[in-house]
Image (tube, grey):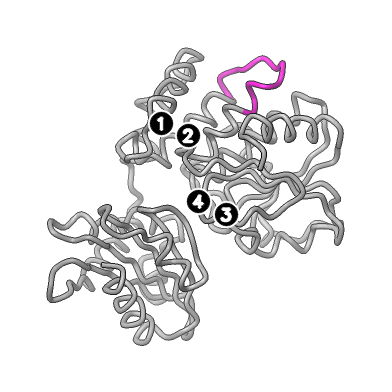
Amino acid sequence: MQSYEQSLQQTRKFLLEHDDYLVVSHVQPDGDAVSSTLAVGWLLSCLGKKYTMLNEGPIPQRMEYLWHADEIVNLADGDLSRQYQNVICVDCADFQRVGLTQRHFATDALIVNIDHHPTNNGYGYVTLIKPDAAATAEILFDLLKTFEVEWDIDIATALYTGLLTDTGGFRYSNTSPKVMAAVSELLELGVNGPTLAETLLEEMTLAQLKVLNRALSTLQLSPEGEIAWVSVTPQDMLDCEAANEDLEGIVNYPRNIRGVEVGILFKVIHERAVKVSLRSAGKVDVAALAQSFGGGGHTRAAGARIDATLEDAIPMVLQEVRRHL
């Protein structure tokens, strides 16, 4: 098995030797997915390469300030008219996380897999995976260092965004000395840390506040007090005029209750499909838990989709959480 440094060099070699790339991240992209997509796009533009950035789903409005964020094509706005031979997947824990964007991968596409999820199964022609990295943006920070390109405020802001959001504002246990050293460099390039923290972590839309209120009205705790969960239905989303991005952070509310080991958000997709978001206080590896339902993620933050009604999904997940406890 090759080392991380060897993987960096292999990825560098691939990016230099090929051209005409499709860059994709996971469905319902978060801060790390968006910033990583744009960081790769920025690098390719510096190298004079042709590329297209694509995602299944819209970019969160609060990230529209990022470099060329408006150039990430939303698959829902219309399919591209072609397939790509060279594909770069960022922040996708498994191949299925790319969603329907894979219809634009050539049958024999060469895939570069850049990711930091421990549950990543190593798909792709080239793999650049570092499970102990705080974010995919941290890996891209290292990758960009292998190229002779001049960093500017645009790339610094993109990388900072990924690190800020995936460390919960530098509060989570993945906030390593290496992360803080990288952040120091990015701040020296002119990143406005306080403004980004306000925009990404503090500000709320009215729709976000309304759907949070609706979710908290469903709050339930297990008899032993170690599991807490909330749920959101399509009707809730409609009533609150909320988008998927408005659900970000809601799962932390049940998790933050004193004594709770696992917090859960059940989001009903339709009558027989539920998206489950899991957060752990540290006692339970929710990545392993999510994998039992075909999902994945990190030790303390993971998720899965369950093809069942909400009424059936809740006891299924609770039973599995109790088993892990």
Decide if residue 27 is on the left or right side of residue 19. left
According to the picture, the residue beneath numbered tag 3 turns out to be: 120
* Discs 3/2, front: 3
Q: CA distance from mark 1 to mark 3?
A: 29 Å
Report the label total. 4
Quadrant of image for the N terminus: top right
Q: Position of residue 41 (x, y in %)?
A: 70, 35
Q: Is residue 293 above or below residue 127?
A: below
| Mark found first going from the N terminus, 4 or 2 | 4
According to the picture, the residue beneath numbered tag 2 turns out to be: 161
The type of residue carrying mark 3 is Asn
Which mark is on residue 196?
1
The type of residue carrying mark 1 is Leu
Q: Residue at x 60, y 32 (%)?
A: 140
Q: Position of residue 156 (x, y in %)?
A: 54, 23
Please state the extent of the stretch shown in magenta in the rendering. Answer: 143-154
Q: CA distance from mark 2 to mark 1?
A: 7 Å
Q: Is residue 80 above or below residue 204?
A: below
Question: Mark 1 and mark 2 in contact (Cβ < 8 Å)?
Answer: yes
The type of residue carrying mark 4 is Pro
Q: Position of residue 66 (x, y in %)?
A: 56, 34
According to the picture, the residue beneath numbered tag 4 turns out to be: 118
Regarding mark 4 in the picture, which secondary structure is present there?
Answer: loop
Crowding near the residue tagged with mark 3, few <14, some 14–19, many ≥20 C-alpha atoms within 10 Å: many
Regarding mark 3 in the picture, which secondary structure is present there?
Answer: loop
Crowding near the residue tagged with mark 1, few <14, some 14–19, many ≥20 C-alpha atoms within 10 Å: many
| Mark found first going from the N terminus, 1 or 3 | 3
Q: CA distance from mark 1 to mark 4?
A: 27 Å
Regarding mark 1 in the picture, which secondary structure is present there?
Answer: helix
